Amino acid sequence: MREGRRVVWLTYPAVHGKPTLQVNQGSMPSIESTYLAMDTEEGVEVVWNELQFTDKKIFKAHEEKIRTMFDNLMVLDHPNIVKFHKYWLDLRETSARVVFITEYVSSGSLRQFLKKTKKNRKTMNARAWKRWSTQILSALSFLHSCDPPIIHGNLTSNTIFIQHNGLIKIGSVWYRVFANELPVPDELRSPLKIQREQNRDLHFFPPEYGYVADNPAVDIFSFGMCALEMAVLEIQCNGDSRVSQQAITQAAQSVEDENMREFILQCLSLEADKRPTAHNLLFHRVLFEVHSLKLLAAHCILNNQYLIPESWLEERTKVIDQNTIIAEIRRKHKPAIVWRYSQVLSLELDKFLDDVRNGIYPLMNFASSRPHILSRGFSLNQEEIQHTKTPTPEPVEVETRKVIQMQCNMEETEDTKRWHLTLFLKLEDRLHRQLSCDLHPTDSSKDIASELVQYGFIHEDDFHKLASFLEEIFHKHRCSLRGTH
């Protein structure tokens, strides 16, 4: 097994080691620039962000707080939040900067999508509205349940992104964290001053914003405005520099679906204590599209997919009698309501499983609300960035993708004293990973699984699954050896 791995950031194009191709992905004040870059190990595009500090003394006085804050941001792991990959500190003679790498979402912002939609059609698809709202609330529920809670504080249709498969990603999660924690210019501590330069976004912020301490109700108001904008495609400002309260009221009244309108108006309550929580909104009747039992079954299938052949669903549906009743509601003095297999198309099930796999229906939506403790992540300092060869193992990046299939092969080595183990893993993004090592007599299945988690080859949630899988293989192997002697 390898001792560690280094993430190399190949930027393109670059001048003096700094990328020059700028991108706009939820940029914010005090971040000098955001650039497009390439993670050469994972083969994916990322965003290179730079946070500048003109006074090195102030930076040094807050360095430990800065490290802790960035470490906490690195361990935020949710399918609907733009991933924070890596950061490092760059200390210069009189100044300092923090370079941090985030996930790149190439499909564009929600605002851009809504503008395109308005050009092509008059109304938004209700199913798409429900899916997007559910994903945004799932991310907010996750952030608000962290310990301590994380308030986004800059949620607009310009900081929400849509991938080509319909997956929503929330960006700029670090906006208010930076504003509250970092020794940056006063302008960043007063977001409304900055927002006055962008009056079109002022309506996303509730009346109390900037006057009281941050709390989850701020994000709920911003979400409500996003939900309204998704429903009507655009809130008309009638030539004004900012959207008026009258325009917002007229837009809300134009929403034809009564449940959808009531849902939006709850979020847009001018009294913060009357706004629902993100977790409670997930169970609102207008969003409860997928029954929790169906969702749980889908996640169980995907979490144990290494035990299920890829063609399992297709083969299973072929042998099922399509007239068989799968569910029935019995009613007094009325005919029973029944559902048969013929009413459930395998293609629809495949699409639903793909949606669950892609993170569109996170299971955590339906879990009881509980705090997520933020643990420390890994960082690189400037010295580690400059020296690519070092005798000491470096921190290993945590694997965030789950294993969906496992296969194993054991072969006897030439000296016949040891066995060689080869693992074939398939991750949820369809990446195939092959790992191999020589087994020692004292190696156990838990030792190997623990080592794979430690060095970033598998997600920590897959530890017990892989350990049980290896233990079963080892048991069969021992039984076969006894049978040959």
Image: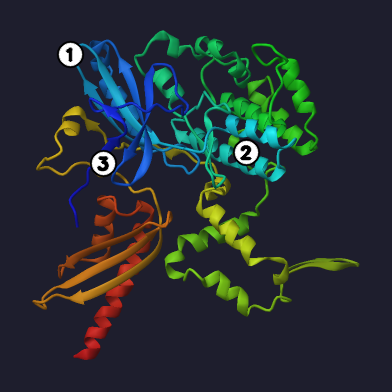
Give, as a three-letter code, the residue at label 3: Val
The residue closer to the viewer here, 305 or 471, is: 305
Give, as a three-letter code, the residue at label 1: Glu
The residue closer to the viewer here, 74 or 476, is: 74
Q: Residues within 10 Å of mark 2 (few under 14, many from 20)?
A: many
**SS class, disc 3:** loop
Label 1 sits on residue = 93
**Res. 7 mark:** 3
User: Which quadrant of the rendered structure holds the C terminus?
Assistant: bottom left
- Left or right side of 366 for 285: right
- The answer to whether residue 332 is visible is yes
- Left or right side of 123 for 61: left
Dots 3 and 1: beta carbons under 8 Å? no
Residue at 59 percent of width and 58 percent of height: 351
- The answer to whether residue 211 is visible is no
| Residue 322 placement: quadrant | bottom right
Of callouts 3 and 1, the N-terminal one? 3
Foreground mark, 2 or 1, reads 1
Label 2 sits on residue = 133
Give, as a three-letter code, the residue at label 2: Ser
Of callouts 2 and 1, the N-terminal one? 1
